[in-house]
């Protein structure tokens, strides 16, 4: 419905809207089109709505009333008037008037993801229907029940009081009690995929990739419960590893609930000491400090879970992964892709056992939809020092603190894109503790109660500040990475990205803090402050993660609008921010010259050998990006051109390069392994089996 409204507005002469309520989340999706519409000569915009249930947002009415040639009429007597009709009429002097009749109010959910029914009618095909709609609208417009709103002080007072009165009727109580934890259908599907991996393919090192909020820990708990049942009287010792105590506390509570055993498991952290170690929930830091592997043999634990497995390439995890040989190793993560190029899939034979990414989770309504706004930043990041795959954080801190002009721009964006600052429950992600404290102090001075928290903050203080945020005593918590993982505040409705985040993992985790479902949250508002970036900064992966679209459609989506977003989601880039992003993506495109430049700097930036797999993992490339769609380039030739290896000649190179694309789709380990072995020693004396003869024929015809 949203795309239809946008198109219709652009070609109309007069617009009439009839809706029960207007939400700011819906209006802001079309406000730019409406502004352009009323700037044209001889156009009019008429809107009829109500204050029913207090659902209309005051800011939405106020914003509409400020538009030129716009008239609004509102019914305040909702006891007598029940306006359930929803209609959008787009009049054209050419005789091509169109209209939509149905169930969609002007809210984000109704025009994007809701289960709504709307019918489009045209003047050419349904002249009588259009005429009757126009007459009915005029009847309502002239009915004394609908009062003109002209944005005078008296009008604003009446509207505010009516909305508050109506919303006050909707109090309710939530009953709570003990209940069984059962897996949802989508969790059952993931559990079934794990069973197939183990029983059919004999793979017992499994990675689950699922968006924050999908319930990875619940899935792990049920998987362990199934493992316990199969073990019967045999050992089922469990080791659960995470890097924060808060994650372990939540995970232990989940396991106890699923297993219906409030005595199951013990914590082992810097402040917790277990009596037994058979079922242990342990921080990786404690694992290293007490050297647990010295007191337990390789087979001691039957089932090992590593939460937030994207951390597992760090040195602190290596002894854990190399020492133990459990019957099952289960990794949990939202984003296995690391911006430093480290490949965590190597611990799982380069396979993902089951996954549910962010777009799918939102489509299934497991997470709240988001409305993402790329706001033009006042800071130029293009000249900052770049080392080891990212901005120098000291330089970032310097340009982001003591910058009152930037803070004013942030507050201005909040006023522009959120309904009311007094309704915000927000998180702001900063580059450093100093930056977080500066932002909290700056917001306080501007009348927005805020607090800064860091990893060094006491647990009691953290909990107290969380309670203040949810209760409305403060509006924002500013932090660096404290709320990246494992800490849930479902009430959060606004997230600020106040620093350029190169790590896709960190970005999706921080975004995920606001995507938890909550009854009072229609959608998550995301404000990402986008400045002119360093040439090596990667915007593309961020938008790919948000949209779920292929890398080749990201530039088109930014230029023309993303057409395949998750249900209820919306992405808008301000004009200058869009230019910054598009310029960055074009400069970072996988042209041969760009690839050669990246190869030349690869080892300096990443600290890793410049192999094909490392290079692809670092930059999230596909094989077609490296070799070209027409097979006109070679990774090793480009390495030679970049000066990182000696030049070489291969007589068959041109023929082979043009045929490489025939192999890009291969995913059969048996075929690939056989091919690698054969090409190392193709003429060894042996008879080929029937399967090997087929393999040989496949390779032959793919090449020649």
Image (spheres, grey):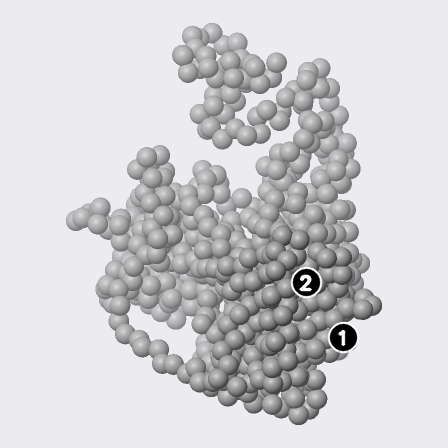
Mark 1 lies on a secondary structure that is loop
The mark lying in front, picked from 1 and 2, is 2
Q: Which residue is mark 2?
A: 90
- Residue situated in front as seen by the camera: 460 or 86: 86
**What residue appears at the point 56 percent right and 79 percent down from the top-left corner?**
50
Q: Position of residue 63 (x, y in %)?
A: 69, 77
Q: Which residue is mark 1?
A: 69
Mark 2 lies on a secondary structure that is strand
- Residue situated in front as seen by the camera: 29 or 599: 29
Choose top left, top right, bottom left or bottom right for residue 119: bottom right
Residue farthest left in this picture = 233
Callout 1 environment at 10 Å: few (<14), some (14 to 19), or many (20+)? some
**What residue appears at the point 55 percent right and 81 percent down from the top-left corner?**
51
Q: Position of residue 652 (x, y in %)?
A: 68, 16
Taking the image as shown, residue 250 lies to the left or right of residue 159, namely: left
As drawn, 334 above or below 197: below
Taking the image as shown, residue 471 lies to the left or right of residue 216, namely: right
As drawn, 631 above or below 63: above
Choose top left, top right, bottom left or bottom right for residue 13: bottom right
Quarter of the figure that contains the C terminus: top right
In three-dimensional space, the C-alpha distance between marks 1 and 2, rounded to whole angstroms, equals 15 Å
Q: Position of residue 651 (x, y in %)?
A: 71, 15
**What residue appears at the point 69 percent right and 67 percent down from the top-left corner?**
15
- Residue situated in front as seen by the camera: 452 or 243: 452
Callout 2 environment at 10 Å: few (<14), some (14 to 19), or many (20+)? many
**What residue appears at the point 68 percent right and 91 percent down from the top-left corner?**
153
Lower sequence index among marks 1 and 2 = 1
């Amino acid at each position: 419905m949203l795309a239809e409204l946008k198109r219709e507005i652009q070609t109309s002469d007069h617009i009439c809207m009839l809706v029960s309520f207007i939400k700011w989340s819906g209006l802001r999706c079309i406000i730019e089109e409406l502004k352009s519409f009323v700037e044209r000569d001889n156009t009019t915009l008429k809107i009829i709505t109500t204050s029913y249930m207090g659902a209309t947002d005051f800011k939405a009415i106020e914003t509409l009333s400020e538009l030129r040639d716009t008239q609004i009429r509102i019914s305040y007597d909702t006891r007598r008037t029940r306006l359930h009709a929803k209609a959008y009429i787009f009049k054209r002097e050419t005789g091509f008037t169109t209209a939509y009749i149905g169930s969609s109010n002007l809210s984000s959910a109704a025009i994007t993801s809701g289960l709504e029914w709307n019918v489009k009618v045209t003047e050419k095909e349904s002249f009588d229907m259009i005429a009757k709609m126009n007459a009915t609208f005029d009847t309502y417009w002239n009915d004394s029940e609908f009062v003109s709103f002209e944005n005078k002080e008296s009008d604003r007072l009446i509207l505010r009081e009516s909305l508050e009165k109506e919303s006050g009727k909707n109090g309710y109580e939530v009953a709570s009690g003990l209940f069984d934890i059962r897996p949802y259908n989508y969790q059952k599907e993931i559990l079934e995929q794990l069973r197939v991996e183990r029983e059919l393919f004999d793979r017992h090192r499994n990675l689950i990739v699922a968006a924050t909020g999908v319930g990875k820990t619940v899935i792990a708990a049920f998987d362990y419960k199934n493992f316990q049942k199969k073990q019967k009287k045999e050992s089922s010792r469990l080791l659960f590893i995470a890097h924060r105590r808060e994650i372990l506390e939540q995970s232990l509570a989940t396991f106890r609930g699923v297993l219906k055993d409030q005595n199951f498991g013990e914590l082992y952290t810097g402040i917790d000491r277990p009596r037994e170690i058979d079922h242990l929930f342990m921080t990786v830091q404690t694992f290293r400090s007490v050297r647990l592997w010295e007191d337990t043999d390789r087979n001691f634990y039957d089932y090992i879970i590593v939460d937030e497995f994207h951390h597992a390439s760090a040195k602190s995890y290596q002894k854990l992964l190399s020492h133990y040989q459990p019957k099952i190793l289960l990794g949990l993560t939202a984003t296995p892709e690391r911006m430093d190029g480290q490949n965590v899939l190597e611990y799982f034979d380069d396979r993902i056992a089951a996954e549910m990414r962010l777009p799918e989770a939102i489509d299934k309504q497991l997470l709240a939809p988001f409305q993402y706004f790329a706001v033009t930043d006042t800071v130029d990041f293009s000249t900052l020092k770049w080392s080891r795959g990212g901005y120098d954080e000291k330089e970032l801190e310097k340009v982001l603190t003591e910058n009152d002009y930037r803070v004013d721009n942030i507050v201005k964006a909040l006023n522009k894109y959120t309904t009311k600052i007094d309704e915000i429950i927000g998180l702001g992600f900063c580059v450093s503790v100093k930056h977080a404290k500066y932002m909290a102090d700056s917001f306080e001075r501007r009348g927005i109660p805020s607090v800064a928290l860091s990893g060094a903050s006491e647990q009691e203080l953290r909990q107290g500040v969380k309670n203040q945020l949810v209760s409305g005593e403060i509006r924002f918590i500013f932090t660096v990475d404290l709320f990246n993982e494992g800490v849930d505040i479902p009430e959060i409705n606004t997230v600020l990205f106040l620093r350029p985040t190169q790590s896709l993992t960190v970005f999706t985790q921080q975004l995920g803090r606001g995507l938890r479902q909550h009854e009072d949250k229609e959608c998550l508002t995301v404000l990402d402050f986008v400045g002119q970036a360093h040439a090596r900064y990667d915007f593309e992966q961020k938008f790919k993660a948000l949209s779920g679209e292929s890398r080749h459609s990201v530039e088109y989506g930014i230029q023309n609008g993303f057409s395949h977003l998750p249900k209820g989601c919306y992405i808008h880039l301000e004009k200058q921010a869009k230019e910054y992003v598009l310029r960055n993506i074009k400069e970072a495109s996988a042209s041969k010259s760009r690839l050669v430049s990246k190869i030349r700097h690869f080892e300096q930036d990443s600290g890793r050998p410049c192999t094909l797999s490392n290079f692809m993992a670092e930059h999230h490339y596909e094989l077609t990006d490296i070799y070209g769609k027409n097979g006109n380039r070679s990774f090793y030739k480009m390495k030679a051109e970049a000066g990182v290896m000696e030049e070489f000649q291969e007589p068959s190179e041109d023929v082979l390069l043009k045929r490489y694309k025939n192999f890009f789709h291969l995913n059969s380990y048996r075929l690939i392994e056989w091919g690698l072995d054969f090409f190392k020693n193709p003429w060894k004396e042996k008879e080929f089996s029937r399967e090997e003869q087929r393999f040989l024929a496949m390779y032959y015809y793919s090449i020649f």
